[in-house]
Image: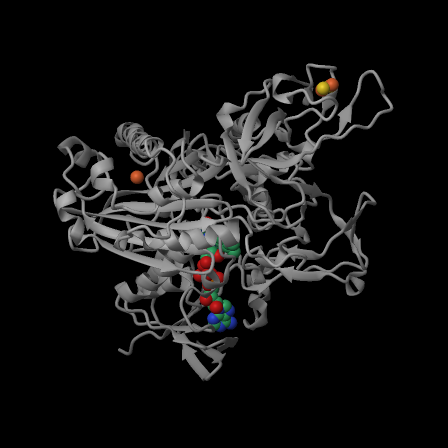
Amino acid sequence: MTLFDHWHPVALSRELRRRRPLKVTLAGADVVLFRDGPRLGALDNTCPHRGFPLHRGRVDAGQLVCPYHGWRWATDGRGQAPGTPTARPCARAWEAVERHGLLWIRRAGSDMPFPFVDISGHGRVTTLRRRVQAPLEVVLDNFTEVEHTPPVHAFLGYPLERMAEVECATTITDDAVTVFNRGPQRRLPAPIRGVFQIPREADFVDAWTTRFSPVHTIYDQYFLVRGSDERRGPALRIAVFYTPVGPALTDLIVLAYASSARWRRPLLEAIRFPMTRLLVRIEVGRDARLLDAMEAPPVVLKGRALGRFDKALTASRRHIARIYRGEGEATGG
Amino acid sequence: MSEKRVVVLGAGPSGLAVAACLRRRGLNPTILERSEAVGSTWRNHYRRLHLHTVKEHSALPGLGWPEQVPTYPARQDVVDYLEAYAAKFELLPRFGEEVTRVRREGDAWELTHTSGSTRADAVVVCTGYNRVPHEPTWPGEEGFTGAILHASKYLDGSPFRGKRALVVGAGNTGAEIALDLWEHGASSVELCIRGPVHVVPRDLLGLPAQITSLRIMQHLPPKLADKITLSLLRFVVGDLSRWGIRRPKLGPVSQVLREKQIPLIDVGTVALIRQGKIVVIPGIERFDAEGVHTVDGAAHPVDVVILATGYRAGIAAFLEGSEGLLDERGYPTVFGAEAAPGLFFVGFRNPLTGQIHDIAREAERVAAAIAGGGR
Ligand SMILES: Cc1cc2nc3c(=O)[nH]c(=O)nc-3n(C[C@H](O)[C@H](O)[C@H](O)COP(=O)(O)OP(=O)(O)OC[C@H]3O[C@@H](n4cnc5c(N)ncnc54)[C@H](O)[C@@H]3O)c2cc1C
Ligand code: FES
Ligand SMILES: [Fe+2]
């Protein structure tokens, strides 16, 4: 098994148009995506004929046409050479699917499960992709601890002076790492509190589970009346996928949802949804800029001075090696 | 004056709702439940199931859904809600009591159940629309070397990773299980849809289908409602006949009223069908060792067959003299009122506007009829 066996989101649906192919890169492998009606095609980007990059071609009648000699490729990889009608050339096809507003690929013939994101009954807030200059592991590290939230983030999270009060519980299972954080929400401007129905004295819960096929984290974020079990306002559910592009390049692919529904309070939600969207974009942008600024960060955790918020990091490294990269697997078994 | 003895059969949504409504009217019904907890069907449904009706129109009388539960509550949310409901109205069903016989004796009802028998002035049957799995059979099934499993025993697709799976049945359950099998890495997923069926997305243009039915379609003449729905579906879903799904001649609203067939509420299966991930096949003619043969003569080798072929109410199995009270498929014909002296049914109707929504209203009416009626 290799990491290509997992279903990776590699682009947003809206990035792939009807007639123009799109090149994506998954862990160094260039793949061209194109549409045949509702069907999605994904082929190795190098034309099997003489190696022209297929993403420079065009889509005609659901087939990808190579600009060099005009050979045509169907979504399943079967080709036609107009000059030699009897030829049966074949391009290497990936399995591809469009779901949740994203385009996903995995190695053809793999039987890895598709990641389950329970968003039934949630309203979509936003879908975004942001490329960061850091290895997958380092990106995941940032997304699985809250200690960076006071200096890095603007809205969600805890005030620096009360960070010591924040509860942080890490649970590690065979295939997942779960973290539950709860603490006093930092001060927020009154209009934001109003729109999100957050009390002046609120606790903020940031809880998530990371799974590793592919590597992704699903967050539940919500507010409570300080020190009580009383929930206030809508909850956010955010799925973040970390798609490796190269050794030090990772795509963050974010699906953000809210537990509220637009039709229920159309006027309030007409303000709340765009505002949530903006908040999510700002906060993800801050993480991304921070990661870009890390400059060749060390991937190995051994020998670093780790704190109480970093327990998930070490566990995740083990899971990535075993579940995601298939290291230490018995060969031939 | 001694209190009226009322027995409620079943502690699902219907039984709990009726019992709560009766308690609010000063009666103290006995609830006999064959399993060990309330809401047993919801404890056993497949894992990813959510209500496809919205929470504000899926509440039982007297208790709303908690704020933090999303629009379409998950299976576990439903179980939690039913527990909270029983606690709020101090309903204490007698668990492990399967009712095996209900019989009219003189001017009362005699019930035989696991631990003995009970006499009652009024009986409310709330044993569910989905009591007995319906498992059709086909020629050659005995020789099939794969596995056959009814949807009621399906939890999730993990046992079927890498397997060739076939799902039989064009209801919500069949469609969602096909989706679940695909997600869990089944090597191929086929969905057998025998006849024409209306496909309605759970959310149409951002609005839940149930809200559209409740707030608009219900109030229009069925013909007009059908017209509007069909043109909307043509626009949103389009023609699926290329993928093996044909639309019935009768509109979706009339179909529910006349043929009691509810449309398929889609939660994502259709998108996978269009992309060729799930393949729709026609009706099954017979099995052989390798798989099935469909009516068009094609062979489909498979490793596992999931029967999402529905359920039966199975009331005749325990209710004596039920003949005049049930229709040809075994469902009661009288709703929300006395079906026979001291006999009531709740939860055996499946309208477009949602079954739990209907149960909540029926429960009130039945409780009023019992509490108000003379002895
Ligand atoms: C997969 C599925 C999804 C559904 N989704 C929705 C939805 O989204 N929205 C909606 O409104 N409705 C939905 N329904 C329909 C309906 O609302 C539910 O089935 C609901 O649980 C019906 O409640 P009930 O109490 O009538 O029956 P059940 O929930 O089936 O409860 C019947 C109870 O009676 C007990 N019982 C049965 N026989 C006996 C006996 N002989 N003696 C003692 N006890 C007995 C059972 O153990 C059970 O606890 C769905 C149904 C199914 C199957
Ligand atoms: S290189 Fe593509 S057709 Fe020749
Ligand atoms: Fe962050």
How many circles with numbers are drawn on the protein? 0
Residue nearer the viewer, A251 or B179:
A251
Residue A160 image offset from top left, x and y in percent: 16, 43
Q: Is residue A163 left or right of residue B330?
A: left
A4 versus A78 height, above or below: below
Residue B215 in which image quadrant: top left
The colour scheme used to paint the residues is one colour
A100 left or right of B183 in image: left
Query: In screen coordinates, is B323 left or right of B205?
Result: right
Please tell me which residue lies in front, A174 or B345.
A174
Residue B360 visible, this angle:
no
Q: Quadrant of the N terminus of chain B?
A: bottom left
Return the x and y of residue A101 as percentages of the image width and height: 48, 32
x then y, percent, for residue B144: 78, 61
A21 over B301 or under it: above or below: above
Question: Which residue in the rendered view is the most extreme toward the front?
Answer: A303
Residue A157 visible at all: yes
Percent across and percent down for residue A183 are 20, 50
Residue A91 is drawn in which quadrant?
A: top right
Residue at figure coordinates x 45%, y 30% from the top left = B205
* Quadrant housing the C terminus of chain B: bottom left
Quadrant hosting ligand 3: top left
| Extreme-right residue of the structure | A86
Q: Is residue A164 above or below residue A33?
A: below
Question: What residue is at 55 percent from the left and 53 percent from the top?
Answer: A327
Nearest the camera: A285 or B342? A285
